[in-house]
Amino acid sequence: MDTFIQQIINGLVLGSMYALIALGYTMVYGVLNLINFAHGDVLMIGAMAGLTILKIVQVVAPDLPGVVKIIIAICGAIPICIAVNLLIERVAYRRLRNAPRLAPLITAIGVSILLQTFAMMIWGRSPIAFPQVISADSYHIMGALISPTQVMLLVLAGISMFGLVLLVEKTKMGRAMRATAENPRVAGLMGVDSNAVIVLTFAIGAALAAVAGVMWGATYASAQFAMGFVPGLKAFSAAVLGGIGNIYGAMLGGILLGLIESLGAGYIGDLTGGFLGSHYQDIFAFVVLIIVLTLRPSGIMGERVADRA
C-alpha cells in the first residue's frame, strides 16, 4: 500500500506537468488545426531561462525564501517563453495557415531543432544542476513521501489549469477563442480578430510551458538543451489520449498518462517477474494510449474541433 500511494503521488506530480504542456498543444490545435511540435522546446527554454534567473536571484537575494525564488524564476521565464512562441508563430506558422498540413509539420520539426541548437550554444551541451532552493525534507502521507517542491508543483498546476478554464469559459476573450476554434470565418464576420486570438493562444500555451519547465527542472534538479523532446512527445500523446482540441481532455490525458507511467514503473518488475525494470515504464503508457485510440480514435473526451470543410 505504501508503494501504491507513493506511485500515485509521483504520478500526479508527473501528470500535472504533462497536463500543462498538453494544454499548449491542444489549444493551438483547437484554434489552428496545427500541431506545434516545437512546444516541448518552449518548455526547455522556460527551464533554462528559469535556471539562469534562479542563479541570479541566489546571488542578488540569497536570503529570500525558496518558494519566492522559484516564483521569481517562473515570472521571469514566462515572458521569455511567450516571446519565443510568438516569434515562432509569426515567422514559421503564420504564412502556412492555409498550406497543406505537411508543410507546418515539417516547419515545426525544423523550429524544434533550431531551438535546441540555440539553447546548446547559449547554455552548453552538458546538463546543468538546478539549485536546491526549497527544503528537501519530505512530508509523510500514509507511509508515502512528498517533497515541498512537489507540493508547490501541484498547487501551481492546479491554479494554472483552473485559471485557464475560467479564462476560456467565463471571459469575452475566451468566447472569442471558442468561436475561432469552432469556425474562424464566421467568427471573423462577427467581429472577432482571429490574429489576436491566435497570438493569445500561443502566449497562454507558452506561459503554461514556462511554469512546467521551471518546475520540471526544480523537481528533477537538472536541465539541458534537449530536455524538451521526450516530455513534449508524451504531452502530445496525453493531449491525443484525452481528445485533441479539448482542454479538459488535455488535463485528464496528462494526469492519466502520468499515473499510468508512474504505476507502471512501480509494478512492472513484479508483473514481469523481474524481466523488465522501471526504465521500461513507457511501455505501459503507450500500450494504454494505443488501446484507447483503437477503441475510441477521438480520445477519451472526444475531439472538439469543428469540420472546417
Image (tube, rainbow, N blue to C red):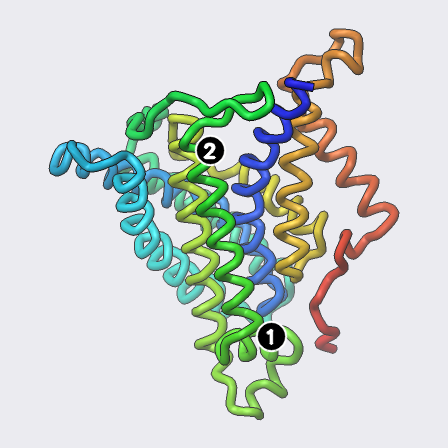
Tell me: residue 292, above or below residue 129.
Answer: below
Crowding at label 2, few (<14), some or many (≥20) Cα neighbours within 10 Å? many
Is residue 298 found left or right of 118 in the rendered image?
right
Q: Nearer the viewer, residue 131 or 297?
A: 131
Q: Nearer the viewer, residue 134 or 218?
A: 134
The three-letter code of the residue at mark 1 reads: Arg
> Could you say where residue 105 lies in the image, as x and y percent from the top left?
58, 55
Crowding at label 1, few (<14), some or many (≥20) Cα neighbours within 10 Å? many
Q: How many marks?
A: 2
Q: Specify the label residue 178 is tagged with.
A: 1
Is residue 35 found left or right of 222 in the rendered image?
right
Tag 1 or tag 2, which sits nearer the N-term? 2
> Could you say where residue 244 lies in the image, as x and y percent from the top left?
68, 57
Asked which secondary structure carries label 1, the reply is: helix
Q: Mark 2 or 1, which is nearer the eye?
A: 2
Answer with the quarter of the image where residue 101 lies.
bottom right
Question: Which quadrant is the N terminus positioned in?
Answer: top right
The three-letter code of the residue at mark 2 reads: Gln
Which residue corresponds to mark 2?
150
